[in-house]
Amino acid sequence: MSNNDNPPNRLIGCTSPYLLQHAHNPVDWQPWGNNAWSEAKDKNRLVLVSIGYSTCHWCHVMEKESFEDNETAEIMNMGMISIKVDREERPDVDMVYMDACQLMTGKGGWPLNVICLPDGRPVYAGTYFPKPQWQQIILQLTTQYRSNPEKFEEYAIQLHQEMQKMNRQPNSMELDFSRRNAFEIFEKYSADIDWIEGGKQRTPKFMVPCQFEYALDFHLCTGDESAKEYVQLSLLKMSNGGLYDHLRGGFFRYSTDGKWFAPHFEKMLYDNAQLIRLYSRAYAWLNAENFKEVTEQTIDFCLRELKAPEGGFYSGLDADSEGQEGRFYTFTYNELQSSLTKDELQWITEYSNIQPNGNWEAKLNIIHANKAPLQVLESLKITAEEYHTLKKAVFKKLFKAQEIKERPSLDYKIITSWNGLMLQGLATAYLYTQVDLYRNEANELANWLTNNALANGTVYRINAKGKQHTEGFLDDYAALALGLVTLFKATHDAQWIEKAKSIADIAVELFYKEGTFNYVSKQAESLIVTKSDNTDDVIPSSNAMMAEVLEALFMHYSKPRYFELFKESLNGNAQFLSEYPGWYSAWARLHLMQTCGNAHVAIHNELPFPNHLELAQWPSWITIGKMDTQSPLSWLSNNKKGYFLCSGTHCYEGVRNWEDTSELLEELYGGEH
């Protein structure tokens, strides 16, 4: 973090925690905007666009080494205009310049440092640079630009053309919705599964919740046992590893190794929101108490450490504290000795493979489930009751020991799209656990978002320090609408589906263009490339979320236009989802939904509803609703006594009980439930 003894630069008036972290750097940073670009054109200088976020470990490292260094700052200030961007505030800027970095270097990441011509076209890009190399790059490029600007112009033209090619829409093609094709897509997805540690065969290991959602729904649609084993294995391994915070609940951002052991210690709202949804589904699907515990503890963490007093959820917590990554969450052997009794120390040593010199780096120990409970019981010769008593006592004491440490910094931005994911997570958790707290929290969040993120027909992306700013991007509209659709499904309160419809209708007006939805609205600032966000990563793509909303609205309102837009989006990504389902897994799930069939069941109020364990045996897109003659949804507005199942445009005769409904669903999905 910058030294506040330095005079402030032009970031001092910003609300972003990341920009304010750099507000006292000796670098003459400016926020993204017309002023910076006009100055660059007036002075004919190269422009550094440096992008990161407040919880980014390597962003802090480069700031400390280079941006806080007076000598480096002088070189930068003399040679170019420097712009700092918070990627979470301006994901549109980040997407464009990340493309440039990928094209130039074959990789990307943060901090993202891109050097551009005064009109914004990039000519050089990279991520983290050590100070000597960074100084050399700035000196060389600024000198060469003054002596030979034509060479820079020539390269900028070529790269810009490649960026435009990269962002052309693929040719639309009609998808094959046969079960054979669905199995072929899953077979491609399965090619690089790690059958020992779960997830995919790669290091570092990222959780990608939409991939597991796809695999789980594939199993529920087809009865495929390999998909079931993959999801079970992955969720168990992730929650046993150091990736999961066993003391405070919640997941860290990713594992630096291939075994989910040593995490990068940021905690992000978007990860935890999606994992709440995933683990609550897995709990009810398997009736697995360990997954229920993970769900509960992750929600507890979010409510305790990320929920804003005024409403909404903050973005995340930093990886670093006391100048060291993971220091808040890890323990030296001496710290464990001083906090625990001899028996408790013996238990945690066995449970987490505690070492006097640390089981990780810098003599630090990561708390994780190194052994299964039965292995610990046998090793320590204790009973199950003693095991649980020791576990509870140890975790309580270590939680208390953490409370006196220096805490990681909090990114207090409330981001609409991530809160939409959290709304979906809380609503799903209520649906599959029936815990009233989760319904109440979901309702409270939905009210806060619709009152604070939505104004005059516009969704805003950021709320920070009580101020809303930055008009929303497609993911803000899509994730918020999807959260509201899920809340309707969980509570049967029609106001939420009506609000989702209103937001989706605005999004169609603002973002739809020629068969796809652009990431930025028609009213937004134009960048050097127009992006359409389709690739599913740690967050599903904004287009896939929007497509799911449109399909849900078609199912509920029977308006053909919604289905036309959904089908256009799905067909526009047909080639990629068929060839690369690992990077299009939210799309693959939507393809699966069309293959197996979406469904909703209207149930008369006097008849019993299926419980959450029964409901979890069917794909996640099924909606079970209470009949209401005042409902705006025609499929719910009758009052006939019975269970009425509809799938697509076909409705079955009413049946007398849920068992008969299950038989109809079995006919529809044909899996082994």
Image (spheres, rainbow, N blue to C red):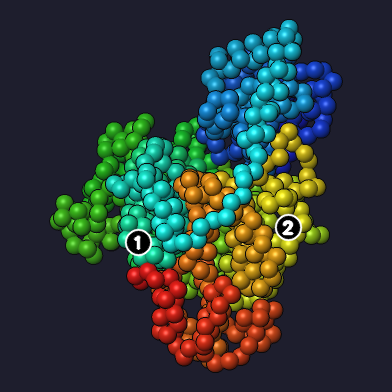
The kind of residue on which mark 1 rests is: Asp
Q: Quadrant of the N terminus?
A: top right
Along the polypeptide, which appears first: circle 1 or circle 2?
1
Using the rendered image of the protein, determine whether residue 418 is visible from the camera's viewpoint.
no
Query: Which residue in the structure is indicated by mark 1?
Result: 224
User: Which label belongs to residue 508?
Assistant: 2
| Image vertical order of residue 192 relative to residue 217, above or below | above
Q: Is residue 42 left or right of residue 241?
A: right
Marks 1/2: CA distance?
37 Å
Crowd band around label 2 with a 10 angstrom C-alpha radius: few (<14), some (14–19), many (20+) = some
Q: Circle 1 sits in a helix, a strand or a loop, which is it?
A: loop
Q: Is residue 201 left or right of residue 133?
A: left
- Residue at 69% x, 9% y is 143
- Residue at 44% x, 43% y is 206
Residue 42: x and y in percent read: 85, 20
User: Which label belongs to residue 440?
Assistant: none
- Residue at 78% x, 34% y is 33
Using the rendered image of the protein, determine whether residue 99 is visible from the camera's viewpoint.
yes
Q: Nearer the viewer, residue 126 or 618?
A: 618
Please identify the quarter of the rendering in which residue 667 is found: bottom left
Q: Nearer the viewer, residue 670 or 659?
A: 670
Crowd band around label 1 with a 10 angstrom C-alpha radius: few (<14), some (14–19), many (20+) = some
Q: Circle 2 sits in a helix, a strand or a loop, which is it?
A: helix
The kind of residue on which mark 2 rests is: Val
Residue 240: x and y in percent read: 34, 51
